[in-house]
Image (cartoon, rainbow, N blue to C red):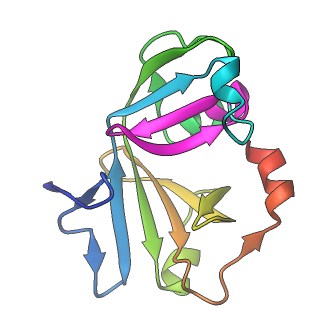
Amino acid sequence: MEHLPNKYGTRSIAGIGCSPKHRSHTDLYDNLRVTSLTEEQHLKTCGYWYLVTSRSMSHTAFKDRENLLQWMEERCLTLKGELAMAGTNSTVQIAGAYRRTSHMSYDEFYSLEGTRVRIVDNGDYTLGIICVDDDHFANVHHLNCNLSDRLIFDYQTSRALVG
């Protein structure tokens, strides 16, 4: 399967990318790394201790190690080395990759069978459904932010749950 670069530093998947039939878009996130921050670095964030990058671009962040490891497990990702505890600067490569698919069809999205999780999309916590594709990549599905009836969770409650 061919992967094509896009303007966000991710790679759209040829043949899956923008599907007129299903009106969905899929990106592949690979070349992932996680960095644990020093106290000084931590104070310059919104309370995060761990930053994740994809292809050297910011991807996501976590306030604690437990939530980082849960996020990785949900996406079938593992660390390639030992990650230092919060407060010690360290960068470790993440083994694996995962996909993220944005859906414009309620029927298509709600027909998926998988693990239901809260994800951040366009600044909101919303419902994600994680499925494992035939090629063993985890795929995090969510409804497009332009849909008016998309489920939105309370921000503070969600942040406390998923870090």
Does residue 137 appear to the left or right of 15 in the view shown? Answer: right
Residue 33, position as x, y percentages in the image = 42, 29
What is the quadrant of residue 154 in the picture? bottom right
Does residue 143 appear to the left or right of 46 in the view shown? Answer: left
Residue 113, position as x, y percentages in the image = 56, 64
**With respect to residue 80, does 66 lie above or below?**
below
Q: Quadrant of the C terminus?
A: top right
Q: Nearer the viewer, residue 60 or 74?
A: 60
Residue 147, position as x, y percentages in the image = 57, 87
How many numbered marks, from 0 up? 0
Question: Residue drawn 74% across and 45% down?
Answer: 162
**With respect to residue 24, does 13 lie above or below?**
above
Question: Residue drawn 48% across and 80% down?
Answer: 108
Residue 141, position as x, y percentages in the image = 50, 64
What is the quadrant of residue 114 in the picture? bottom right
Question: Residue drawn 47% across and 84% down?
Answer: 104
Q: Nearer the viewer, residue 9 or 21?
A: 9
Question: Residue drawn 30% across and 51% down?
Answer: 9
Is residue 111 in view? Answer: no
Is residue 90 in view? Answer: yes
Residue sitting at the far left = 2
Q: Quadrant of the N terminus?
A: bottom left
Is residue 25 rendered magenta in the image? Answer: no
Does residue 78 appear to the left or right of 162 in the view shown? Answer: left
Does residue 111 appear to the left or right of 149 in the view shown? Answer: left
Residue sitting at the far right = 157
Please state the extent of the stretch shown in magenta in the rendering: 49-68
Q: Nearer the viewer, residue 1 or 161?
A: 161
